[in-house]
Image (cartoon, helix red, strand yellow):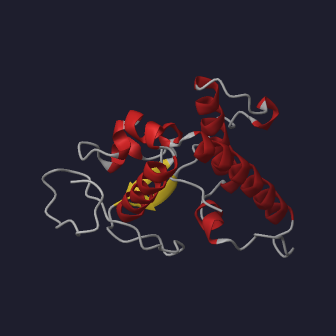
Amino acid sequence: MRIWNLKPSLLDSKGLGAAWREALLAKSILIKLNQDPTRKVGYGSHAQLIRFKRCPYPIWAIQALINDLYAESLKRGYHYNPENVEEIPFGIIPTIPITRGQIRYEWNLLATKIANRAPKWFGQTPELGSFQYSEEDIKSPLVTIVESASLEFWEREKNIPSLSFQAGDTKKEPDTAIFR
């Protein structure tokens, strides 16, 4: 399970479809846990759900993500089920605090996946392969960036190339970087 903290517009068609399915699954799990916190639910302790469980309104936070994914699907002419879209109640502003390091990691992971899986999409999506974008430009609208270079504690880090976000970044890029 991977629930991205990045803008849905960055996802290729396979990524958007997977994000939609996994967000719906996550919502189902969060609803079951909300109804009975002592109940054992499959995937109920999955690391990707921790950020939502830490929100004041976890179900509305995942619902806001579902709504964003649906809006992106409409822009592309996809036909996702509109019955899964719900209006967020007035006064509830779901935000998810995520570290700057986590956003960088996910951007790098997504760019690497799409460069291999969908090179045409990669070439049409400048945010994936350019240093001119900051974390603020690529994060999901639900995300509030926390100033920390570390990954979130729930992330299971994979060995992927590390990318820099800005041309003047003071961090030395490793030899494995796929962008220069």
> Is 73 placed above or below 159 here?
above
Q: Is residue 16 above or below residue 156?
A: above
Q: Is residue 48 above or below residue 27?
A: below
Residue occupying the point 40% across, 44% down: 138
Q: Is residue 171 left or right of residue 75?
A: left
- Residue under the image location 49 percent in, 75 percent down: 153
Q: x and y percent of residue 87 in the render?
A: 71, 33
Closer-to-camera residue (37/74): 74
Quadrant (top left, top right, bottom left, bottom right) of the C terminus = bottom left
**Which residue lies at the image location 47% right of the left edge and 37% below the top edge?**
121
Left or right of 76, for residue 111: left
Please tell me in which quadrant of the rendered image residue 171 appears.
bottom left
Point 60% across, 37% down: residue = 68
Name the residue nearer the viewer: 156 or 160.
160
| Number of numbered discs on residues | 0
The foreground one among 75 and 114 is 114
